[in-house]
Image (spheres, rainbow, N blue to C red):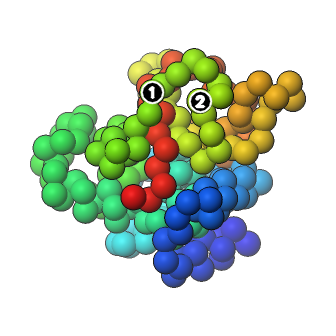
Amino acid sequence: MIVLALVLAQALSPLSGTELVERVIEAAHAQARQAVRYDGTYRRLPYPGGDVPAEVGVCTDVVIRAYRAAGIDLQQRVHEDMRRAFHAYPKLWGLDRPDPNIDHRRVPNLQTYFRRRGAELEASRDATAYVPGDLVTWMLPGNLPHIGVVSDRRTSDGTRPLLVHNIGAGPQLEDMLFRFPITGHYRYRGE
């Protein structure tokens, strides 16, 4: 069902403001109810609008799919920005040009894209700084970058927002805002 909704959403024009945030959060929550096997295998994807099979994914796929449900194709947007300014992106993979099959599925590239779009905010230890629809990046043990979507739901004591992310067990809604060192905080609304 979510797959059909995501496919249909690709035909929609991008939303803005509150409607965009609501759609992103709704799509993130829907993913947390799906069985998804963690799999970051390189795959050839259609462009634009390409996605890995619905039953597989990694942390970035949660973000990609949530924004796509709101009519924003981060595969296309990241690729176009990388074509314009490849020099501004990390050189961690030995590439000499953008690759629309994988670039949007890498946390450091998403961080760079959001920063270049003016969406970067302070990475705070104050839970109230994180609002629904924000994106948070962390550095996991072993220097593994990670990303998740801030939910509109909160911890049982109401002190922290829950996040939708995929750290290896498929998309989950969890209390993990301060579980690992935060490396980025972004409020991307499709600008």
In the rendered image, residue 6, in percent from the top left (x then y), is placed at 60, 71
Which residue is drawn at the image coordinates 29% and 45% (left, top)? 116
Secondary structure beneath label 2: helix
Disc 2 target residue: 129
- The correct choice, above or below, for 127 with respect to 79 in the image is above
Disc 1 target residue: 122
Which residue is drawn at the image coordinates 35% and 72% (left, top)? 47
Which residue is drawn at the image coordinates 69% and 68% (left, top)? 2
In the rendered image, residue 64, in percent from the top left (x then y), is placed at 50, 56
Asked whether, in this view, residue 7 is left or right of residue 100, the answer is right
Can residue 123 be seen from the camera position used here? yes
Mark 2 or mark 1: name the one nearer the start of the chain: 1
Amino acid under disc 2: Ala
Q: Do the numbered discs 2 and 1 sit on residues whose CB atoms are within 8 Å?
A: yes
Secondary structure beneath label 1: loop
The residue nearer to you, when weighing 29 against 51, is: 29
- Near mark 2 (Cα within 10 A), the count class, few <14, some 14-19 or many ≥20, is few
Q: In which quarter of the image is the C terminus?
A: bottom left
Asked whether, in this view, residue 4 is left or right of residue 64, the answer is right
In the rendered image, residue 148, in percent from the top left (x then y), is placed at 57, 40
Question: Dividing the picture into quarters, in which one does residue 162 lie?
Answer: top right
Q: In which quarter of the image is the N terminus?
A: bottom right
The residue nearer to you, when weighing 171 against 40, is: 171
Amino acid under disc 1: Glu
In the rendered image, residue 103, in percent from the top left (x then y), is placed at 32, 51
